[in-house]
Amino acid sequence: MSASRLEDGLLHSCLNTKARRRRSGAPATRRSSGWGSSPLHLPRNNNMIQADPVPQVEGPFPLSTLRHSTAHLMASAVQKLYPEAQFGFGPSIEHGFYYDFDLPEPLTDKDLRKIEKEMRRIANRSPKIEKETVSRDEARAKLKEWGQHFKLEGLDLIPEGEDITFYYHGDGDERWGDLCEGPHVDSLKELKFVFKLQHVAGAYWRGDEKNKMLQRIYGTAFWNKEQLDAHLEWLEEVKKRDHRKLGTELDLFSTHEQAGSGFVFWHPNLGTIRREIEAFWWDLHTRGGYKPVYTPHVSRESLFAVSGHLENYGEMMYAPMDLDALPYRVKPMNCPGHALIYADRGRSYRELPLRWAELGTVYRYEKSGVVHGMLRVRGFTQDDAHIFCTPEQLADEIAGVCRMVDTVLRTFGFEYKAYLATRPAEKTIGEDEIWEKATQSLRDAAAQLDLPLELDEGGGAFYGPKIDYKIKDALGREWQNSTIQCDFNLPERFDLNYTAPDGSQQRPIMVHRAILGSLERFVGGLIEHFGGKFPVWIAPTQVAVIPIREEHAPYSRTLADRLTAEGFRVEAMLEAAHMNKKIKHAQKEQTPYMLIAGEREAADGTVAVRRRGTREQSVVPFDTFLEMLKGLRDSKSLEVPDVEGASVS
RNA sequence: GCUGCUGUAGCUCAGUGGUAGAGCACUUCCUUGGUAAGGAAGAGGUCACGGGUUCAAAUCCCGUCAGCAGCUCCA
């Protein structure tokens, strides 16, 4: 299902590119594996990357060059206003640019306006940008003279043999230069472009939390105002759809100071959505040959010593509870529990593969600063499952999971890409042979399904290769939720075996997989994906029934009763109150359909159907509406179409 | 965890040293209205929490909790 079929038609086609950091100008990027990767850690980082939806028109230079030059312009303005400023790095990034400064006083938004003004003045007065190539010693001498110690450190990061260049602009006492690899635009004035400074934030020098924290100013630049405005509008749209904002507006969830940070309370509306998703999920899993398991939330600490979590993941775990002189822990993952079930008795090759699923709630002590709405929390439910199989069965099992991922993601209208993450260069466990075999199985599975795999060389976990999925939402943003991971480690640690046909004891492969990732993160993302306009099958209230006058309540009641009997979630707004208020209420709640009924409808057995977000309505026989609604629900349609019928104004 | 900022009614916010305000929402009454704000009245707040300064603190200071923007982390 293409995202363009979403009701409000928001679709942006640009794929994101990860913020590209200039080698000489920015801290070295961490390898992109960052998605969390182990059964010791199913992926659950925010991992939402904002793609730029603004079609980038051609300029005389690449947009990134313009933005980098704008960063220089900003830095020179900062120096003019704060002569004692020390400069860090100032690269262009996906949506704009930033520059890091060490300043004696924290900057405020007011200061940003001041800096913008200064930037305009400098650009007008002396717009030329000039390049100078120097020797390393000259560069060092110059930076020393300028007293720029971060830049001196930056100089040492430039590999031997590379040109060392400075870029200058400004005249006389305003001449400003920066150690920089370039390239830059030639002029800050003749070229037409627009820029805006957006916000200030803290950032560690060279991205290391042991280093000093600098002040980072973020800004953006475009070749024309239309593009800048379009970008700012897109940011507004993102803000409007923020799941935390919609969470309040639509009465979906809350968090509480009394309960602590990172714990989500699902209100009835969101509980309804979750239950529908869970029912869908269980249905798919039952059909897919999965059996439900349930495992305790608290276990003796020694269980996590065996699994290795205590050692490798201990910092993320909640502190032990001492009971009868033994330490107990709240589980941070479900896999040890499933391994215990497997190990409970001897297993034969005849029973493999075993597929066990659990919507397992886990608790992880996330750092206080990273908690974010429903997207990064301390207590959450993973849609977890483990498959225990032989190496020969692996390809088919993976293919089965890929099929299920496809079904689920398409049902919600997500496009996706899959990545094959192979063996890391160092510190892995397992024989070469099993790695090769497993990796090949992942490839085979994808080939079976014509699923293109992009390669993430060396991006696998230490205990096995994996396939990760990236999805794109209705705003063009990318998320990472689904993951399929082969694990050679836990079977080893728990000494899991099966008896092979020849009577020997063999080690099964354990496949960890999550499709939604966690209910919290998935549903949080879903709120933003749909912007609160949920499709019929998950909408908390599917139909609002509104009588025009109080005397039409009895007919409205029969409509509501019939819908309820058909299993729909109906809000019968029968109390004596203004029809207009009821319509407004239902619109605000994003109820997909309103049925408005007065004398004419009661006489004809019809309903005036009004779709959310519109003012138009059509009059159709109630049964026609009912059939359409059933169709939308049962097919899990993403559309909330207008009803064909006599239109009435 | 780090840097900066914020916390006042269910929601959005105003109030910078002198005993707490608005709009929306809510309740009641009037209005019986054909498709997104009819009218009137009312109720609702330990100004996050704890300590301090002061004759006096929502307001100034310190701490805690929670949130926001980032950074870092997410073997």
Image: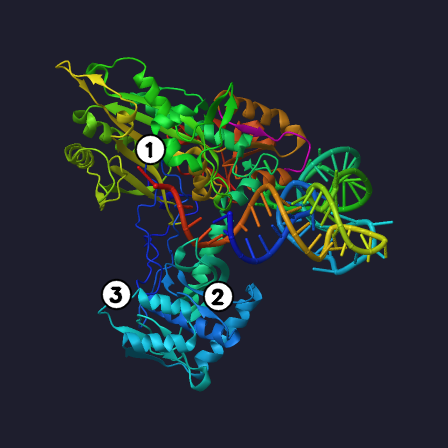
Residue type pointed to by label 1: Pro
In this picture, residue A163 sits left or right of residue A74: left
In this picture, residue A612 sits left or right of residue A467: right
**Quick check: A612 above or below A164?**
above
In this picture, residue A87 sits left or right of residue B41: left
Query: For the residue labelled by badge 3, is the local secondary structure a helix, a strand or a loop?
Result: loop
Observer-side mark, 1 or 3, equals: 3
Q: Nearer the viewer, residue A378 or A644?
A: A378
- The residue tagged 1 is A39
Residue type pointed to by label 2: Asp
Mark 1 Cα within 10 Å, few/some/many (few <14, many 20+)? many
- The residue tagged 2 is A102
**Quick check: A97 above or below A132?**
above
Using the rendered view, name the quadrant where residue A359 is placed. top left
The disc, 2 or 1, on the residue closer to the chain's N-terminal end is 1
Query: For the residue labelled by badge 1, is the local secondary structure a helix, a strand or a loop?
Result: loop
